[in-house]
Image (cartoon, rainbow, N blue to C red):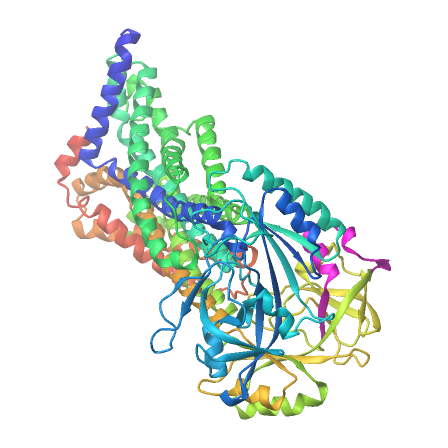
Amino acid sequence: MSKSMVAPSVWMWAWTQTWRDFRGGSMRLLLVAVALAVAALTAVSFFANRIERGLSRDAAQLLGADVVVVADQPIADAWERQARSDGLRTSRTWVFPSMARAPDERGGESRLVAIKAVDQAYPLRGRLTIAMADAQGAPGAPQPAPAGGPAAGHAWVDPGLLDILGLQLGDELWLGEAALRIEAVIVSEPDRGAGFVNFSPRVMMSQADLARTELIQPASRVTYRLLAAGPLRPMDAQPAQAPRPDRPATGDAGDAGAEPRLEAFTRWAQQQAQEARGARVETLEQGQPQMRTTLDRASLFLRLVALLAALLSAVAVAVVARDFAQRRLDDCALLRVFGVPQSFMAKAYALQFLTVGVLASVLGSVLGWAFHLVFVSLLGSLVSVSLPAAGVAPWLLGLSVGVLLTLGFGLPSVLQLAQVPPLRVLRRDLGEPRTASWLVAGLGLAALVGLLLMVAGDLVLGGIALGGFAAAVAVFALAGWLLAQGLRRLAASWGERWPAWWSLSVRQLTAQTAQTVVQVAALGVGLMALLLLILIRTDLVDSWRAATPVDAPDRFVINIQPDQVQAFQATLRQAGVQDFDWYPMTRARLLAINGEAVSGDRYADDRAQRLVEREFNLSFAAQIPAHNPVVAGRYQAGGSDGFSVEEGLMQTLGLQLGDRLRFEMAGVIHEGRITSVRRVDWASMRVNFFVMAPSDEMPMWPVTYITAFKVPANTSLDRQLVQQYPNVTVIDVSATLAQVQSVMTQVISAVEFLFAFTLAAGLVVLVAGMMASRERRAREWAILRSLGATHALMARVQRTELLVLGALGGGLAGLASLAMGWALAHQVFEFAWQAPWWWPVPGAVAGACLAWLAGWWTLRGVSRRPVVMTLRQVE
């Protein structure tokens, strides 16, 4: 057979065999397993890819510019001149908290608001959307706002402020010494940000009105922002008037030199910020959507479920390939007798599996693209940008995963067929598949592991998922081997006393140890994934909800004076608020660490510089807050010189247990030693502090009090508190809380949808485990029936064997899922999770039932097959 004749015949033989195997059904299970894994992974990848592309495209809208200089002092004109000299457009904004007041004739109510003053060039990127008054005086349909924000003498406000103050569009609003007419309500604001001050209702005004209000004084806490951007883009607000002469709009959408100029200004600004105290530079890479933390956690959930589906499919492929190789032994022996060389057979089977892998990859990728549209409908509203079409990366991922799954886990077993000796046609004990090629299996496994780690996007998540699966497979295989060995020894000692059905069941389990090991491992990993998903759906998801429960505080009140404590708490209880956080609070500035003075120059990290240059909120309590677990040291009350520090602050500032911190608070110097480290969930909507003293009193500290609570429905508690205690500040975070809870509901729906993939993959593994022993059981049962065994006896033997395997696999799967669930909860999702240690018991019961059902469905025709037909097939 010449080389020129071999190549086309290999392709033709591979294609013909693939078609026959599909018609016969032996390749269908392999196709389904691979397609499920590809569909699960690509569905998540398509969605994530579209989000990332959308955010990258519209990231500037999250800043309102391409680069922003932020400072707590007025920004020198030199910064703006440098930006204009680099050909950039510029704009300025001023953001600060203050009180807004309704006119006396409209009730005179007041409310803490976040004021934002803008100039005539705002915004440089993105679109500001407002709603003007309709014919009835109510807010009408949303419309793009004119560039430059409100005109002088006018204000735009959040809709909620109108309800709080009892005002309407067209009414006046007092800000300091100036009365502004409310012209519109704000529907969307591109660069609102997520700072604490921005939880308050927004009031937007013209920079021209700032002086009239007299709100900015030398001691005012104002955030000054200088925005810079290149040429206008189609998604930006278009100027409603000619640009101001002092702020010209340079360039156009096709200005190819914009990027170098922007980079040049960014480098210059970052150098200047290192020398200017209290200034920093924000770029597009730092712009993030308001719910990015929640989306990141949602992505971890979705990637975990997709990884489980892929890993289960890998097990299914390995089991199906081993069964495929077992069935092809006789065919390969005949081919060897007819002179077919080993190289021809190896190429043919490799091409056959490659064909199946490519076909399954294409099918799975198409299904993944279709199913990702469900994610878009469930989660697309969480992203404030329109989603563009997906790139080519998810398609390449689907093709890579499918081919690697098929070749890496299927080909090693099949390649052994090329080594079947021709003597197998005479001696059936020859040519049994040996251990697969370590080189081929190792390369395939390493490539798939690397690809899945890349898909996981988190080394801890990928390590727990992949390492947990590998360890579980090893444990399940060892358990199967121990079961077979133990039963063999018991049979040798007690077998004569056992009833026939039990003796035959034990014989089935011990006759071929390899088959028992494969079935226990396959059943175990399939059940482990299913049980782990149930844990995630119930305990872990409930823990996620508990992090921000329905009754989480939606009001924060600050500046409560010590002589108002008892009266204020009494007011809360009379209004029906029985559960509330209550802590003393003092403003302090960090002066020194271990006796060495601190400044921003000491740190290269931007966040560390901002932390040491700002004031901290300190508190003290004899008992550690229940929602702040200690991760290092000991929180022990009684010491007035101890500090408990938040874990993230420890890492950012490079602190260690035992370090001494010196703070200055309103002229009082206090120094203490770090005695414990706390983990704080800043998204919990609870009162939290960077630094706490483990003491019930600190008499030298100048303190006010802060409280957080949930306002009872149908009450006017906000108004009552402001009227009765005019010095306090009430901060309403109900809108943010409702948004977070809405996000959780949508994310959980998406996770449940993806569970279907893993559930299907788990069932495929169970069926594959049963299919692997189908023909062996058929031969053995045919012999037993020819010796007089009844159909009822064989059915009982089958049921007993499946129940034993299922109970063992389910019990071990329950233990393994607990271990992985605990690791995921604490190391990845950071939930406080109490493991249900009774979980292996229902796992064993569920395993026995599922194994029996899967075995009955797969083997239902084996015991009824005519004995003569089976024996003839064996011959």
- The residue shown at (14%, 39%) is 867
* Residue depicted at x 75% and y 77%: 695
Magenta stretch holds residue 601: yes
Q: Position of residue 332 (x, y in %)?
A: 27, 22
Mark count: 0
Spot the residue most to the top. Answer: 2
In the image, is residue 140 above or below residue 652? below
Residue 489 in sight in this render: no
Task: Give the vertical position of 722 relative to 116 (above or below).
Answer: below
Where does the image place residue 307, in percent across and percent down from the top left?
43, 47
Quadrant of res 413 = top left
Which is nearer the eye, 621 or 666?
Answer: 666
Assign the N terminus to one quadrant of the image.
Answer: top left
Of residue 51 and residue 820, the one placed in the foreground of this image is: 51
Horizontally, residue 603 falls left or right of residue 163, namely right
Q: Is residue 834 magenta?
A: no
The image position of residue 54, as x and y in percent, is 44, 48
Furthest-right residue in view?
595
Between 149 and 374, which is closer to the camera in this rendering?
149
Towards the viewer: 862 or 830: 830
Q: Is residue 323 left or right of residue 688?
A: left
Q: Determine whether, in the image, residue 179 is placed left or right of residue 844.
A: right
- Vertical side of 391 occupied by 556: above or below: below
Depicted 122 relative to depicted 697: above or below: above
Q: Position of residue 59 (x, y in %)?
A: 50, 50
Residue 538 in sight here: yes
Extent of the magenta region: 593-620
Q: Quadrant of the C terminus?
A: top left
